[in-house]
Amino acid sequence: MTQTRAALRPTVLTALLAALLSVLLAPAPASAASLQEVTGFGSNPGALKMYRYVPDGLPAGRPVVVALHGCTQNAAGYASGTGWTTLADRWGFSVVLPQQQSGNNLTQCFNWFQTSDIARGQGEAASVAQMVDRQLADVSGDPSRVYVTGLSAGGGMTAVMMAAYPEKFAAGGIVAGLPYGCAQAAGSPYVCMYVGATQTPAQWGDRVRAARPGYTGPWPALTVFQGTADYTVKPANMTALVDQWTDVHGADRTADVSDTVAGYPHRVYRGPGGNAVVETYSLTGMGHGQPVDPGTGDAQCGAAGAYFLDVNLCAAYRLGKAWQLG
Protein backbone atom coordinates (compact mmCIF):
# COMPACT_ATOMS: atom_id res chain seq x y z
CA MET A 1 0.00 0.00 0.00
CA THR A 2 2.85 2.38 0.75
CA GLN A 3 4.31 1.94 -2.69
CA THR A 4 0.90 2.46 -4.34
CA ARG A 5 0.32 5.73 -2.48
CA ALA A 6 3.76 6.98 -3.42
CA ALA A 7 3.07 6.16 -7.02
CA LEU A 8 -0.22 8.04 -6.94
CA ARG A 9 1.11 11.21 -5.36
CA PRO A 10 2.72 12.75 -8.51
CA THR A 11 -0.43 12.07 -10.52
CA VAL A 12 -2.69 13.71 -7.95
CA LEU A 13 -0.27 16.62 -7.52
CA THR A 14 -0.08 17.13 -11.27
CA ALA A 15 -3.87 17.17 -11.56
CA LEU A 16 -4.18 19.66 -8.73
CA LEU A 17 -1.55 21.94 -10.27
CA ALA A 18 -3.23 21.74 -13.66
CA ALA A 19 -6.58 22.67 -12.15
CA LEU A 20 -5.02 25.57 -10.26
CA LEU A 21 -3.30 26.86 -13.38
CA SER A 22 -6.49 26.63 -15.41
CA VAL A 23 -8.20 28.88 -12.87
CA LEU A 24 -5.32 31.33 -12.69
CA LEU A 25 -4.86 31.57 -16.45
CA ALA A 26 -8.53 31.63 -17.41
CA PRO A 27 -9.71 34.99 -18.80
CA ALA A 28 -11.41 37.14 -16.18
CA PRO A 29 -15.18 37.37 -16.58
CA ALA A 30 -16.42 40.58 -18.13
CA SER A 31 -17.37 43.10 -15.51
CA ALA A 32 -21.01 44.05 -15.26
CA ALA A 33 -21.97 47.30 -16.94
CA SER A 34 -22.35 50.32 -14.72
CA LEU A 35 -23.63 53.86 -14.92
CA GLN A 36 -21.05 56.19 -16.42
CA GLU A 37 -20.86 59.96 -16.63
CA VAL A 38 -20.24 61.47 -20.06
CA THR A 39 -18.66 64.91 -20.38
CA GLY A 40 -18.14 67.12 -23.40
CA PHE A 41 -21.35 66.01 -25.09
CA GLY A 42 -22.02 69.45 -26.59
CA SER A 43 -22.37 73.09 -25.67
CA ASN A 44 -24.80 72.01 -22.91
CA PRO A 45 -26.71 75.31 -22.61
CA GLY A 46 -28.89 73.87 -19.86
CA ALA A 47 -25.90 72.94 -17.68
CA LEU A 48 -27.11 69.37 -17.11
CA LYS A 49 -25.06 66.26 -16.38
CA MET A 50 -25.15 63.25 -18.68
CA TYR A 51 -25.04 59.67 -17.45
CA ARG A 52 -25.57 56.53 -19.45
CA TYR A 53 -25.92 52.79 -19.09
CA VAL A 54 -24.65 50.55 -21.89
CA PRO A 55 -24.96 46.79 -21.40
CA ASP A 56 -21.75 44.84 -21.97
CA GLY A 57 -21.39 43.67 -25.55
CA LEU A 58 -24.26 45.78 -26.85
CA PRO A 59 -24.24 45.49 -30.65
CA ALA A 60 -24.68 48.42 -33.02
CA GLY A 61 -28.13 49.38 -34.22
CA ARG A 62 -29.90 49.01 -30.88
CA PRO A 63 -32.53 51.39 -29.40
CA VAL A 64 -31.83 54.21 -26.97
CA VAL A 65 -34.07 55.18 -24.04
CA VAL A 66 -33.75 58.61 -22.41
CA ALA A 67 -34.99 58.48 -18.79
CA LEU A 68 -35.54 61.71 -16.85
CA HIS A 69 -35.71 61.60 -13.05
CA GLY A 70 -38.19 63.45 -10.85
CA CYS A 71 -37.60 66.20 -8.29
CA THR A 72 -35.18 65.36 -5.42
CA GLN A 73 -33.95 62.36 -7.44
CA ASN A 74 -30.79 61.68 -9.43
CA ALA A 75 -29.76 59.63 -12.44
CA ALA A 76 -28.42 56.62 -10.50
CA GLY A 77 -31.46 56.27 -8.27
CA TYR A 78 -33.85 56.62 -11.17
CA ALA A 79 -31.91 54.12 -13.28
CA SER A 80 -32.22 51.36 -10.69
CA GLY A 81 -35.54 52.30 -9.09
CA THR A 82 -37.48 52.27 -12.35
CA GLY A 83 -36.00 49.01 -13.60
CA TRP A 84 -34.70 50.54 -16.83
CA THR A 85 -31.16 49.21 -16.41
CA THR A 86 -32.44 45.69 -15.69
CA LEU A 87 -34.54 45.79 -18.85
CA ALA A 88 -31.59 47.21 -20.82
CA ASP A 89 -29.55 44.14 -19.90
CA ARG A 90 -32.44 41.80 -20.64
CA TRP A 91 -33.53 43.25 -23.96
CA GLY A 92 -30.40 44.93 -25.29
CA PHE A 93 -30.63 48.70 -25.47
CA SER A 94 -28.80 51.63 -23.91
CA VAL A 95 -30.15 54.23 -21.48
CA VAL A 96 -29.32 57.93 -21.30
CA LEU A 97 -29.97 59.49 -17.89
CA PRO A 98 -29.79 63.29 -17.77
CA GLN A 99 -29.26 64.70 -14.28
CA GLN A 100 -30.35 68.08 -13.02
CA GLN A 101 -27.97 70.22 -10.96
CA SER A 102 -28.90 72.19 -7.87
CA GLY A 103 -27.51 75.31 -9.49
CA ASN A 104 -30.37 75.12 -11.98
CA ASN A 105 -33.07 74.03 -9.55
CA LEU A 106 -32.66 73.68 -5.78
CA THR A 107 -34.89 70.61 -5.61
CA GLN A 108 -33.31 68.92 -8.64
CA CYS A 109 -36.44 69.38 -10.79
CA PHE A 110 -36.01 69.70 -14.52
CA ASN A 111 -37.29 73.15 -15.49
CA TRP A 112 -40.28 72.03 -17.59
CA PHE A 113 -41.99 75.34 -16.73
CA GLN A 114 -39.24 77.78 -17.77
CA THR A 115 -39.70 79.23 -21.25
CA SER A 116 -35.93 79.43 -21.71
CA ASP A 117 -35.54 75.69 -21.00
CA ILE A 118 -38.38 74.28 -23.11
CA ALA A 119 -37.74 75.94 -26.49
CA ARG A 120 -35.95 74.16 -29.30
CA GLY A 121 -32.27 75.05 -29.35
CA GLN A 122 -32.26 76.48 -25.85
CA GLY A 123 -31.56 75.54 -22.26
CA GLU A 124 -32.23 72.10 -20.85
CA ALA A 125 -34.13 70.88 -23.91
CA ALA A 126 -31.10 71.53 -26.11
CA SER A 127 -28.82 69.80 -23.59
CA VAL A 128 -30.91 66.62 -23.64
CA ALA A 129 -31.02 66.70 -27.45
CA GLN A 130 -27.21 66.91 -27.49
CA MET A 131 -27.03 63.89 -25.19
CA VAL A 132 -29.13 61.91 -27.66
CA ASP A 133 -26.81 62.82 -30.53
CA ARG A 134 -23.73 61.88 -28.51
CA GLN A 135 -25.19 58.55 -27.45
CA LEU A 136 -26.25 57.58 -30.96
CA ALA A 137 -22.74 58.38 -32.20
CA ASP A 138 -20.93 56.55 -29.39
CA VAL A 139 -22.92 53.31 -29.45
CA SER A 140 -23.98 53.37 -33.13
CA GLY A 141 -27.59 53.35 -31.93
CA ASP A 142 -30.66 53.25 -34.16
CA PRO A 143 -31.81 56.86 -34.66
CA SER A 144 -35.29 55.66 -35.61
CA ARG A 145 -35.69 53.93 -32.23
CA VAL A 146 -35.01 56.60 -29.64
CA TYR A 147 -37.54 56.94 -26.81
CA VAL A 148 -37.95 59.38 -23.95
CA THR A 149 -39.66 58.98 -20.58
CA GLY A 150 -39.70 60.61 -17.17
CA LEU A 151 -41.42 61.04 -13.83
CA SER A 152 -43.08 64.22 -12.57
CA ALA A 153 -40.78 67.10 -13.59
CA GLY A 154 -39.02 64.53 -15.74
CA GLY A 155 -42.42 63.75 -17.24
CA GLY A 156 -42.91 67.43 -17.94
CA MET A 157 -39.51 67.50 -19.65
CA THR A 158 -40.49 64.40 -21.63
CA ALA A 159 -43.38 66.37 -23.12
CA VAL A 160 -40.90 69.17 -23.86
CA MET A 161 -38.60 66.84 -25.80
CA MET A 162 -41.48 65.31 -27.74
CA ALA A 163 -42.69 68.78 -28.74
CA ALA A 164 -39.41 70.61 -29.34
CA TYR A 165 -37.53 67.69 -30.92
CA PRO A 166 -40.22 65.39 -32.37
CA GLU A 167 -37.95 64.15 -35.14
CA LYS A 168 -35.60 62.58 -32.57
CA PHE A 169 -38.14 60.41 -30.73
CA ALA A 170 -40.33 57.55 -31.89
CA ALA A 171 -42.40 57.66 -28.70
CA GLY A 172 -42.55 59.03 -25.17
CA GLY A 173 -43.75 57.85 -21.79
CA ILE A 174 -44.97 60.42 -19.26
CA VAL A 175 -45.39 59.34 -15.64
CA ALA A 176 -47.32 61.79 -13.42
CA GLY A 177 -46.29 64.60 -15.76
CA LEU A 178 -47.65 67.66 -17.52
CA PRO A 179 -48.61 68.64 -21.08
CA TYR A 180 -46.28 70.82 -23.08
CA GLY A 181 -46.75 74.53 -22.34
CA CYS A 182 -48.92 73.85 -19.29
CA ALA A 183 -47.24 76.40 -17.01
CA GLN A 184 -47.59 79.10 -19.67
CA ALA A 185 -51.23 78.17 -20.32
CA ALA A 186 -52.11 78.12 -16.60
CA GLY A 187 -50.04 81.19 -15.74
CA SER A 188 -48.11 79.28 -13.10
CA PRO A 189 -46.50 75.84 -12.74
CA TYR A 190 -48.36 75.35 -9.45
CA VAL A 191 -51.76 76.06 -10.99
CA CYS A 192 -50.84 73.62 -13.74
CA MET A 193 -49.84 70.93 -11.25
CA TYR A 194 -52.58 71.32 -8.67
CA VAL A 195 -55.52 72.39 -10.85
CA GLY A 196 -54.66 72.13 -14.53
CA ALA A 197 -54.87 74.62 -17.37
CA THR A 198 -58.03 75.41 -19.29
CA GLN A 199 -57.34 74.84 -22.98
CA THR A 200 -59.23 73.27 -25.85
CA PRO A 201 -57.63 70.25 -27.55
CA ALA A 202 -56.78 72.48 -30.51
CA GLN A 203 -55.12 75.03 -28.23
CA TRP A 204 -53.10 72.29 -26.57
CA GLY A 205 -52.11 70.94 -29.98
CA ASP A 206 -51.14 74.40 -31.19
CA ARG A 207 -48.64 74.69 -28.35
CA VAL A 208 -46.87 71.56 -29.56
CA ARG A 209 -46.97 72.61 -33.21
CA ALA A 210 -45.51 76.01 -32.31
CA ALA A 211 -42.55 74.33 -30.61
CA ARG A 212 -41.28 72.97 -33.94
CA PRO A 213 -42.49 75.42 -36.60
CA GLY A 214 -43.07 73.88 -40.01
CA TYR A 215 -42.77 70.30 -38.81
CA THR A 216 -45.48 68.04 -40.24
CA GLY A 217 -44.60 64.71 -38.67
CA PRO A 218 -44.30 61.95 -37.88
CA TRP A 219 -45.01 62.82 -34.25
CA PRO A 220 -44.00 60.64 -31.30
CA ALA A 221 -46.62 58.33 -29.84
CA LEU A 222 -47.42 58.88 -26.16
CA THR A 223 -48.09 56.63 -23.18
CA VAL A 224 -49.24 58.19 -19.88
CA PHE A 225 -49.27 56.71 -16.36
CA GLN A 226 -51.21 58.65 -13.73
CA GLY A 227 -52.29 57.87 -10.18
CA THR A 228 -55.88 58.76 -9.32
CA ALA A 229 -54.82 59.77 -5.79
CA ASP A 230 -51.94 61.98 -6.97
CA TYR A 231 -52.25 65.35 -5.22
CA THR A 232 -48.93 66.71 -6.55
CA VAL A 233 -49.79 66.45 -10.23
CA LYS A 234 -53.55 66.18 -10.54
CA PRO A 235 -55.13 63.64 -12.91
CA ALA A 236 -56.53 66.55 -14.92
CA ASN A 237 -53.07 66.71 -16.47
CA MET A 238 -53.46 63.25 -17.99
CA THR A 239 -56.71 64.40 -19.58
CA ALA A 240 -54.89 67.43 -20.97
CA LEU A 241 -52.11 65.21 -22.33
CA VAL A 242 -54.68 63.06 -24.11
CA ASP A 243 -56.31 66.19 -25.56
CA GLN A 244 -52.95 67.60 -26.64
CA TRP A 245 -51.48 64.57 -28.35
CA THR A 246 -54.63 63.18 -29.94
CA ASP A 247 -55.04 66.61 -31.52
CA VAL A 248 -51.44 66.61 -32.73
CA HIS A 249 -51.93 63.17 -34.26
CA GLY A 250 -55.32 64.02 -35.77
CA ALA A 251 -57.09 61.42 -33.64
CA ASP A 252 -60.42 61.74 -31.86
CA ARG A 253 -60.76 61.53 -28.10
CA THR A 254 -62.85 58.38 -28.03
CA ALA A 255 -60.75 55.43 -26.91
CA ASP A 256 -60.52 52.59 -29.42
CA VAL A 257 -59.53 50.16 -26.66
CA SER A 258 -60.94 50.27 -23.12
CA ASP A 259 -59.82 47.41 -20.91
CA THR A 260 -57.82 46.72 -17.77
CA VAL A 261 -54.15 45.83 -17.28
CA ALA A 262 -53.15 44.41 -13.90
CA GLY A 263 -56.60 45.54 -12.72
CA TYR A 264 -56.16 49.18 -13.79
CA PRO A 265 -58.15 51.06 -16.45
CA HIS A 266 -56.23 51.16 -19.71
CA ARG A 267 -57.14 53.13 -22.85
CA VAL A 268 -55.73 53.24 -26.37
CA TYR A 269 -56.44 55.98 -28.90
CA ARG A 270 -55.67 55.23 -32.55
CA GLY A 271 -54.72 57.71 -35.22
CA PRO A 272 -56.16 57.98 -38.73
CA GLY A 273 -53.81 55.24 -39.90
CA GLY A 274 -55.04 52.83 -37.23
CA ASN A 275 -51.87 52.87 -35.14
CA ALA A 276 -51.88 53.58 -31.41
CA VAL A 277 -50.91 57.24 -30.89
CA VAL A 278 -51.93 57.77 -27.25
CA GLU A 279 -52.21 55.17 -24.48
CA THR A 280 -53.15 55.73 -20.84
CA TYR A 281 -52.94 53.81 -17.58
CA SER A 282 -55.08 55.20 -14.75
CA LEU A 283 -53.63 53.74 -11.57
CA THR A 284 -56.52 53.59 -9.13
CA GLY A 285 -55.56 54.78 -5.65
CA MET A 286 -51.92 55.47 -6.52
CA GLY A 287 -50.29 58.68 -5.30
CA HIS A 288 -47.41 60.59 -6.85
CA GLY A 289 -44.64 58.37 -8.15
CA GLN A 290 -43.35 55.82 -10.62
CA PRO A 291 -45.34 52.56 -10.80
CA VAL A 292 -43.11 49.55 -10.13
CA ASP A 293 -43.61 45.85 -9.54
CA PRO A 294 -40.53 44.40 -7.80
CA GLY A 295 -39.82 40.75 -8.40
CA THR A 296 -38.29 38.25 -10.80
CA GLY A 297 -41.31 37.59 -13.00
CA ASP A 298 -41.20 38.42 -16.69
CA ALA A 299 -43.42 41.50 -16.33
CA GLN A 300 -41.86 42.64 -13.05
CA CYS A 301 -39.24 45.35 -12.61
CA GLY A 302 -38.21 48.24 -10.40
CA ALA A 303 -37.62 48.64 -6.68
CA ALA A 304 -40.01 50.18 -4.16
CA GLY A 305 -38.93 53.37 -2.42
CA ALA A 306 -39.67 57.08 -2.18
CA TYR A 307 -41.65 57.95 -5.32
CA PHE A 308 -41.25 54.36 -6.59
CA LEU A 309 -44.62 52.85 -5.76
CA ASP A 310 -45.26 49.11 -5.74
CA VAL A 311 -48.65 48.83 -7.43
CA ASN A 312 -48.12 45.45 -9.17
CA LEU A 313 -47.49 47.17 -12.50
CA CYS A 314 -44.07 48.23 -13.76
CA ALA A 315 -44.29 51.28 -16.01
CA ALA A 316 -40.87 50.63 -17.58
CA TYR A 317 -41.90 47.12 -18.61
CA ARG A 318 -45.17 48.34 -20.13
CA LEU A 319 -43.35 51.07 -22.03
CA GLY A 320 -40.71 48.63 -23.22
CA LYS A 321 -43.36 46.29 -24.59
CA ALA A 322 -45.25 49.17 -26.27
CA TRP A 323 -41.97 50.27 -27.88
CA GLN A 324 -41.11 46.67 -28.88
CA LEU A 325 -37.83 46.76 -27.01
CA GLY A 326 -38.22 43.15 -25.96
Image (cartoon, rainbow, N blue to C red):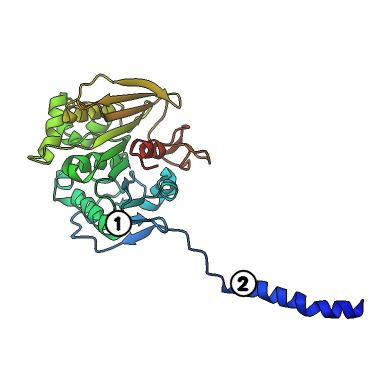
Residue 42: where, in percent of width, then height?
20, 60
Residue under the point 21% across and 55% down: 130
Task: Check disc 2: other Cα within 10 Å, few if <14, some if 14-19, many if 20+.
Answer: few
Residue 325: where, in percent of width, then height?
36, 42
Residue 102, placed above or below residue 192: below
From mark 2 to mark 1, how far is it between C-alphas? 41 Å
- Of 29 and 124, nearer the camera is 29
- Of 315 and 48, nearer the camera is 315
Residue under the point 22% across and 34% down: 179
Q: Residue furthest left?
A: 214
Q: Is residue 16 left or right of residue 30?
A: right
Question: Looking at the image, is mark 2 or mark 1 earlier in the sequence?
Answer: 2
Name which quarter of the figure residue 233 lies in: top left
Name which quarter of the figure residue 205 lies in: top left
Please state which amino acid type lies under the numbered disc 2. Ser
The quarter of the image holding the C terminus is top left
Please state which amino acid type lies under the numbered disc 1. Met
Residue 232, placed above or below residue 116: above
Q: Is residue 46 left or right of residue 52?
A: left
Secondary structure of the residue carrying tag 2 is helix
The quarter of the image holding the N terminus is bottom right
**Which numbered circle lies on residue 289?**
none
State the residue position of label 2. Answer: 22
Q: Is residue 114 visible?
A: no
- Count of marks placed on residues: 2
Task: Check disc 1: other Cα within 10 Å, few if <14, some if 14-19, many if 20+.
Answer: many
**Which numbered circle lies on residue 50?**
1
Secondary structure of the residue carrying tag 1 is strand
Q: Is residue 315 left or right of residue 188?
A: right
Residue under the point 18% across and 44% down: 167
Residue under the point 23% across and 56% down: 47
